[in-house]
Image (cartoon, grey):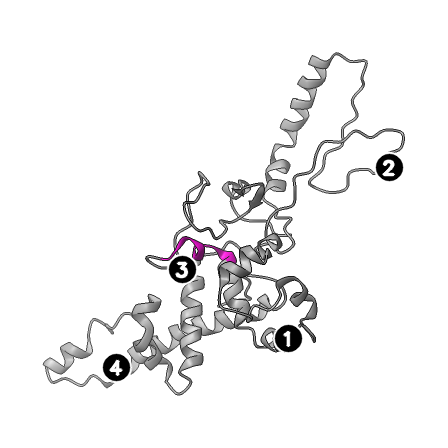
Amino acid sequence: MTDTSTADEANRYKVGRRFFVYAPPLKGVRPSKRKPPNPPYKGAPAWKCSVYYYWWEYLRRHDGYRQCCMRGGKGKYAKLYGDFGNVHAHDDFWQWWSKEAHSELFCEPTARQIRVLDENSRFEPTLSNDTLTLELPLEVRTAYLITRIRSVLKQYEAQAKAAKRISRARYPVATKPVLTSLHQHLTVYDAYRANPKLKLYELYDLIHADAGLYVSESVEGETVAASKKLLLPYDYILRTIKQRKANLVRRHIRIAEQYIDAVGQGKFPLRKGR
């Protein structure tokens, strides 16, 4: 289970009778009154504005899971396959999410109800941080009981807020996602796999506009263009800029690989470092 970072995340996104900690992919108008997440890129459709869409995309990049799909769900990732199925059977995310009902992997379970312990019930002392057990003397006036219950709940207000921030989905989101970053990492990674012969700084030049990448092309206040114009040497400037580009691309690839490795363990988005 995952403890998300802000109190606002205690509010679930409601879709029909289901609740999600983070905005689910939707087609059409989003019914929730909550502010929608920032899109991963300008003009992204609503069904891509979700961490759950990128969970599917990153899982499709996992080579071990791909082999498992080719073997019909057998091998090291058989258990994960039992939940996520063949993500390579087609390229239609919406079919996988909606028609094949994989959205159920990420939604919160039905809220528990208050229950009365009778003589047939098995009483267990409260050991968890998300349950409070009370004993109510029935001979006491109802109005007084209600007042006391409210007082007790007030004492556990912080604990209640913490409990609401915990996802109980079968596959909870591991950390608070930033969709723009998930998109950038994946865009760079895909380009890297598609162009294995390119040097990393060349890869930057190829995709920086689409991926939203940026490095400064000024070194100690000097640029290649200005140096050329003044007939000054610019090898150091050019070499520094190439190194900056390569370092940025390398970082995105490294993060994407960590996410891909973790998604094969049923955890996303999760990485060890930069």
Q: Which residue is mark 2?
A: 122
Q: Which residue is mark 3?
A: 180
Residue 238 tag number = 4
Secondary structure at badge 3 equals helix
Q: Is residue 89 left or right of residue 168?
A: left
How far is disc 4 from disc 3 in space, using C-alphas? 29 Å
Which amino acid, by three-letter code, is at mark 2?
A: Arg
Residue 31 part of the magenta-drawn span: no
| Tag 1 residue | 68
Cα distance between the residues tagged 2 and 1: 43 Å
- Snapshot quadrant of residue 144: top right
Residue 102 x %, y %: 59, 57
Q: CA distance from mark 3 to mark 2?
A: 49 Å
Q: In front of the other: label 4 or label 2?
A: 2
Instruction: Please report whichever mark, 4 or 2, sits nearer to the chain's N-terminal start.
Output: 2
Label 4 to label 2: alpha-carbon separation: 74 Å
